[in-house]
Image (cartoon, rainbow, N blue to C red):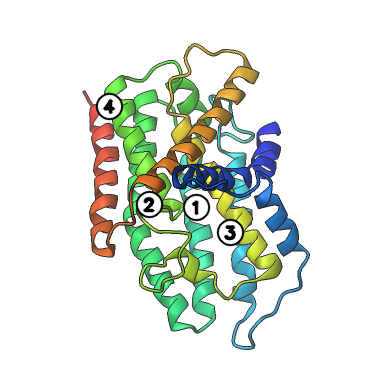
Amino acid sequence: MLQIVLAVALSPLLPVVIQRVKALFAGRQGPPWLQGYFDLWKLLRKGGTYSRTTTWVFRAGPLVNFACLLVALLILPLGGLPAVVSFDGDWILLAYMLALGRFCMVVAALDTGSSFEGMGASREVQFAVFTEPALLLGLAALARETGMMSLSGMYGELALTGEVPFRILLSAGMFILYLAENCRIPVDDPATHLELTMIHEVMVLDHGAVDFGLIQWGGALKLWVVGALWSGLLPLGALRHPLALLLAGLGGLLGLAVLTGVVESVMARLRLLRMPQLLVGAGMMCALSLLLTFR
């Protein structure tokens, strides 16, 4: 259970790491390291205000999304360590948990009756059409390469085996999916509120207080969950001790956050019409990695 505790406790640090790296590139100091915890403490203490046009769907969206990410953590290995719960086909459940959390956030945005939030929900679902098949292809490639049907077995076996071309292709595809799933540059810019470019941020404009706190915390957990899928692809065959594997997994998440900050500092958000091409490219990389396993 240490992995779950660490994920819930340390995930708010990941957005701060990304912001500090971007601030370093811009010659600024950046936010304090504990800024994520300060924001969550402030939001979780506030009382919520709800429009009379919304229903229970609006309030349930952030809570169900947060619960889905906690379930995903239960079946997700970290750094070669097995997950708390493991069974054959749990990688399909992981994909469904991410999809269910997205669905609940989309319907919560639509429940406001705002055409502005409806626009963001439409874009979120459009991108999901490309990211979800790519994620399933990538996980299927892992299952085929390792001969395992559970996430713990797949990543545990991959730490000992796995060819270099397979790792490179799958890592590149999963990194693009990591940026897309977490609405980072070049897919979306979380720092803007320009209506022509917003995707995820526009969906949560009407949420506040505890609901928005759960959304922020859930966003940090999603960075952890999808990041763990990528960091598990690192070659860790020389490590045997559980503590070393855990530290390697945490180091992979930290390095991925730094890499995300570098990407957001050196490039801008792509045009909306270019986004499907990028996501299809990620899907093709995952598909090619699957084809390599049939040699």
Q: Which mark is residue 187?
A: none
Q: CA distance from mark 3 to mark 2?
A: 16 Å
Q: Which mark is residue 132?
A: 2
Marks 2 and 1 close (CB-CB < 8 Å) = yes
Q: Which residue is mark 1?
A: 98
Q: Residues within 10 Å of mark 4 (few under 14, many from 20)?
A: some
Instruction: Give x and y (percent) for residue 105.
Output: 53, 66
Indicate which label's residue lies in the foreground, 4 or 3. Answer: 3
Q: CA distance from mark 4 to mark 2?
A: 21 Å
Q: Is residue 161 left or right of residue 47?
A: left
Task: Work out whether mark 2 precedes mark 1 in sequence or the reverse, and give the earlier one.
Answer: 1
Task: Work out whether mark 3 precedes mark 2 in sequence or the reverse, and give the earlier one.
Answer: 3
When asked about the image quadrant of residue 234, the answer is top left
Q: Residues within 10 Å of mark 1 (few under 14, many from 20)?
A: many
Report if residue 150 is visible in the image.
Answer: no
Q: Is residue 135 left or right of residue 79?
A: left
Helix, strand or loop at mark 3:
helix
